[in-house]
Amino acid sequence: MLLLGSRLKLVLAASCLAVLQIAAKPLQIPVVDGVIGGVPSVTPPVHQEAVGDQPVSSAIVPGKLRYVQNSGVCETTPGVFQASGYADLTATQSMWFWFFEARNNPSKAPVSIWLNGGPGSSSMIGLFQENGPCRINTDQRTVSLNPFSWNNNANMLYIDQPIGVGFSHGDLQVGTTAQAAAAVWNMLQIFFADPKFSSFAGNEFAIWTESYGGHYGPGFSAYILQQNAAIRAGTIPGIIINLQTLGVGNGLTDPLSQYAGYMLYAASNPYHPTVSASTITAANTSFYQANTGCKALIQSCYSTGATATCTRAQQFCNSAVLSRLQGNNDIYDVRQGLDDPYPPDITTLMTSSSFTSKIGAESTWQITNNQVYNNFANTGDWMHNSAIDLEMVINAGIRTVIYDGDADFILNFKGVELMVNNLQTKFTGTIAQQAFTNYTVSGRQAGLVKNAGTFSYIRIFGAGHEVPAYNFTGLVDYP
């Protein structure tokens, strides 16, 4: 997963799962008053206490881990270690994690964290619907071993963050990417200081994320690099995190670039137009209108950083552009109708008392915590430009992979490619001059790729928003 060759092809190998129809599932990105990714008209303050169950296991000790070892849940490969539990950031903040050793050579394998987006969505989505050691079955209650799991060759660490997301619980104090980065840094410091996991501290470290991870990935990576530099300079204590790789799938990184892609994708994608030509024309007007259009609002957010301006941009753009252009299509897979039920919903499993007791979970799970989402909506973080952090990370030599599925609407490849084309890095000139080449897996063309130095962009055929959840027909048959 650290190189463009066989390891990175796990992105495609993990995608080899048949699409089956089941009952409707809840959405990752909230729909607020009919607007996808809308801003609540009345919202609570950022600082509040999460509503949920109280801890039931051993006493909280700030700065320490509490976890269950080898629960027998999900990873059933003989001899492969797993641990699930909490990093207690403070006496009132416990961050959930689930760690799986690599099936092959774990002592030398990289440590890769997986983060879902939202903001406010649980990373159990990625674990059970996408790339984890097991996959949710269509009965929504049981799982099957995943032979294509990313923990074949990486030690995988799934984290529910910020506090309040998924099984994490406690005071909700995060409403920006910068605040979330600091909290995850603290969690990783606690994790690598624990005697059970300290041996992994020097291993190569990777961040893999999707969706709002277009903010999280660059922001968290930049923060890690800054903290590492401060530790080396002796200005702060801590454990160096050996960051080597950043991977972002279908991510929201540079809204100014990416929102222009909605009209392009609605009119021309590999499958079908999403709405009528007149609707696309109306969305174009809403985007480009001088002073009051979506583009002007995002530009004002970029230049001023004013919370009111950025939240206004989020509400207007997601109403007049994003939601308007969805049509009768699933936002995560344009090939399907509204509310496509694939991948299977994991809520029944995640809320089963027998399941949660085995893994040491202490709070009631939900796919997305709306309180956390609202906290981010209140700050305008959605419309901030994370491309600045992404450029810094790329220029620092971190192996960076931007990938997307070509069937995703909500963060579609047209917008992502506009973002990539507008990056200003040491590889910009090379990427601009390159034509796409075929991305092949098992001898089959599975996408298109550009690569320059330590930067790659990959468009993956036949995948929706959660890229590793989808099957590319004829590539590999899933048992």
Image (cartoon, grey):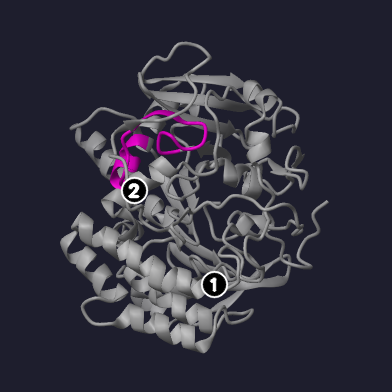
Q: Which residue is mark 1?
A: 449
- Residue 283: image quadrant is bottom left
**Quarter occupied by residue 382:** bottom left
Residue 148 disc label: none
Check disc 1 and give the amino acid type. Val
Front-most of 425 and 264? 264
Nearer to me, 419 or 382: 382
- Name the quadrant containing residue 101: top right
Q: Amino acid at mark 2?
A: Phe
Q: Is residue 270 left or right of residue 54?
A: right
Q: Which residue is mark 2?
A: 376
Looking at the image, which residue is at 58% across and 82% down?
Answer: 273
Q: Position of residue 292 (x, y in %)?
A: 24, 76
Please say whether residue 220 is one of the residues in the magenta stretch. Answer: no
Q: Is residue 328 visible?
A: yes
What x and y, as percent, mark residue 20? 77, 57
* 176 relative to 276 in the view: left or right: left
Give the image location of residue 442, x and y in percent.
73, 65
Q: Earlier in the sequence, mark 2 or mark 1?
A: 2
Tell whether 249 sits left or right of 11. Answer: left
Q: Secondary structure at mark 1?
A: strand
Report how far apart the C-alphas of labels 2 and 1 lie in the structure: 33 Å
Task: Say which element carries label 2.
Answer: helix
Relative to 13, residue 162 above or below: above
- Say few, some or many: other residues with alpha carbon within 10 Å of mark 2 (under 14 / 14 to 19 / 20 or more): many
Instruction: Classify 10 Å Cα crowding around label 1: few (below 14), some (14-19), many (20 and above).
Output: some
Query: For residue 178: magenta?
Result: yes
Q: Position of residue 19 (x, y in %)?
A: 74, 59
The span shown in magenta is 161-183
From what the image shows, is residue 268 above or below residue 3?
Answer: below
